[in-house]
Amino acid sequence: MDESPELATRRKRLLYRSVYRGNKENDILLGQFARAHIAEFDTAELDQYEQLLETGDNEIFDWVAGKAPVPPEADTPVLRRFLAFRVRF
């Protein structure tokens, strides 16, 4: 099944936002994660991923590094996949 042009554009936009964050560490982590998973995300997962991208770089890096706990409102299945993904590096 072909996806709509709007959905394809959304995926491309989210991939771009993942790779060009401004913080090189997050560019690498989020970029690799997005390249590996964004094509398989459904709409709800894209919404969760977009919510993650709205989070500040320092917060994301602190969660990845284990310096800060993930707040309940940010704890989504996509975030858990992202945190598990980074362990493989």
Image: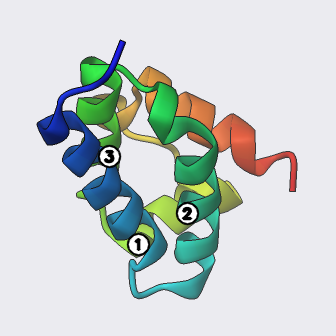
Is the residue 38 above or below the residue 21 in the image? above
| Residue sitting at the far right | 88
Q: Position of residue 8 (x, y in %)?
A: 27, 41
Residue on which the image places disc 3: 11
Is the residue 87 above or below the residue 3 in the image? below
Q: Position of residue 70 (x, y in %)?
A: 46, 42
What residue is at 26 percent from the left and 59 percent from the top?
Answer: 13
Label for residue 76? none
> Depth-wise, is mark 3 or mark 1 nearer the camera?
3
Q: CA distance from mark 2 to mark 1?
A: 13 Å
Judged from the image, the secondary structure of the residue bearing numbered disc 3 is helix
Q: How many marks?
A: 3
What residue is at 72 percent from the left and 41 percent from the top?
Answer: 85
Mark 2 or mark 1, earlier in chain: 2
Residue on which the image places disc 1: 57
Label 1 amino acid?
Asp
Q: CA distance from mark 2 to mark 3?
A: 12 Å
| Residue sitting at the far top | 1
| Residue sitting at the far left | 6
Q: Position of residue 74 (x, y in %)?
A: 33, 37
| Front-lying residue, 6 or 57 | 6
Residue on which the image places disc 2: 31
Q: Quadrant of the N terminus?
A: top left
Label 3 amino acid?
Arg
